[in-house]
Image: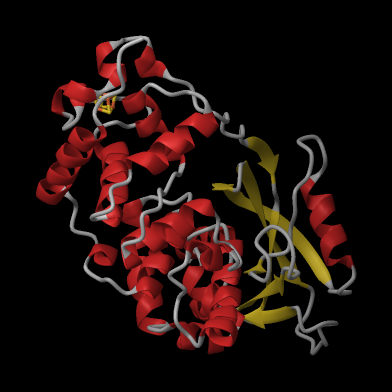
Amino acid sequence: MPPPPPRSAIRRKLLRWYRKTKRDLPWRRTGDAYAIWVSETMLQQTQVSTVIPYFENFLTAFPTVDALARAPLAKVLRLWSGLGYYRRAENLRSAARQIMRAHGGRVPSDFDRLRELPGVGDYTAGAIASIAFGRRYPAIDGNARRVLSRLLGIMEERSLRAAAADLVPRSRPGDFNQAIMELGATVCTPKHQRCADCAVNSLCASRASPHAATLRRSRAPAKPTSVVWPLAIVRRDGKILLRRRSAGGLLAGLWELPGGEITARASAAKLLRQELAGLDLPLIRHQKLGEIRHAITHRRIRSPIYVFDLARKIQMELPKSCWRWIAPARLHRLAASSMTAKALALLSTYEKTAD
Ligand code: SF4
């Protein structure tokens, strides 16, 4: 078995490469632990280019832990709308409240205290501790796991974690962790390894062995499920009907068009009439507008959109505060699901062509 590559050479080469080539990203221009924590949370499951405008808007609206802790959840969700995985936003706000209560409003620098915060796992705690506070912890997400596994030639999770912890330098641990992430995002990607351009190619176990270059992930990614999710646009006097999802579960707390998942063979129109039955609305007809496609949390969604019109202009009480009428142009004021926004964009296109 060949000797392991010298740790010091890997660190030196990676840090030098990172200093020269790192992308200029907004969260890399700050040492503020709160901003770094927000960025790391947003970057989970989401691409850098998508995150940038959300990060900037979020920090403008909630520039401090205190501001986030005091913000209504609806406002936090509204600023998160479109980023997906909304539990992250709820956890951020809960954690901000915990930091106000237990840490005087300062993001803790200690790994174990960070791990106690809602939504902060080993990766995020390691990233915050190393990047914001210069603590010597690894930050191992799927990206880093792949790069380190290839680089060190280690496939077993526990051995990989031990080797990764040993590899993080005392000096500039945050830059080192970000260098690993950067290498995984730009050079040593899941499908392509650009070994010829790689700063550590002379030290890499996979570079030396073509078989090692295809190390498998320790955990296979969950396969997306195909789902049919019809949505109803109920129109009345230029407004449409929305309901708010319950606090727990998928898309918790977001406003959406009535609808839901069905099996491929069930009738979409029937399901929508059932969903609306409790409101006792005088619906006269419905028509299919078209379909949209969407993906959330391991679901690949096909969503047929139906428009329902009311039989007459009447005053009516909606039964619960989780239902409301809203003008489509005011949708941006609510934390609404992306599917709802897409469906209303389809309605807008339809209405323009029908005029
Ligand atoms: Fe990845 Fe190739 Fe670089 Fe090794 S040499 S870390 S396999 S890109």
User: Which residue shows up at 40% across the image and 39% down it?
Assistant: 164
15 horizontally vs 91: left or right: left
Ligand 1 shows up in the quarter that is top left
User: Which residue shows up at 26% across the image and 34% down it?
Assistant: 7
User: Which residue shows up at 52% across the image and 82% down it?
Assistant: 103
Residue 225, relative to residue 217: is it above or below?
below
Residue 144, relative to residue 53: is it above or below?
above
- Front residue of 48 and 229: 48
- Front residue of 75 and 2: 2
Q: Quadrant of the N terminus?
A: top left
Q: Can residue 74 be seen in this view?
A: no
Residue 352 position within the rendered picture, expressed as x and y whole percent measured from the top left: 45, 64
- Front residue of 50 and 260: 50
Query: Residue most toward the left?
Result: 20
338 horizontally vs 18: left or right: right
User: Which residue shows up at 31% across the image and 10% down it?
Assistant: 210
Residue 4 position within the rendered picture, expressed as x and y whole percent measured from the top left: 31, 22
80 horizontally vs 302: left or right: left
- Front residue of 159 and 100: 159
* Quadrant in the rendering for residue 301: top right
What count of labels does the image hold? Answer: 0
How is the structure coloured here? secondary structure
Residue 187 position within the rendered picture, expressed as x and y whole percent measured from the top left: 24, 33
Residue 46 position within the rendered picture, expressed as x and y whole percent measured from the top left: 44, 51
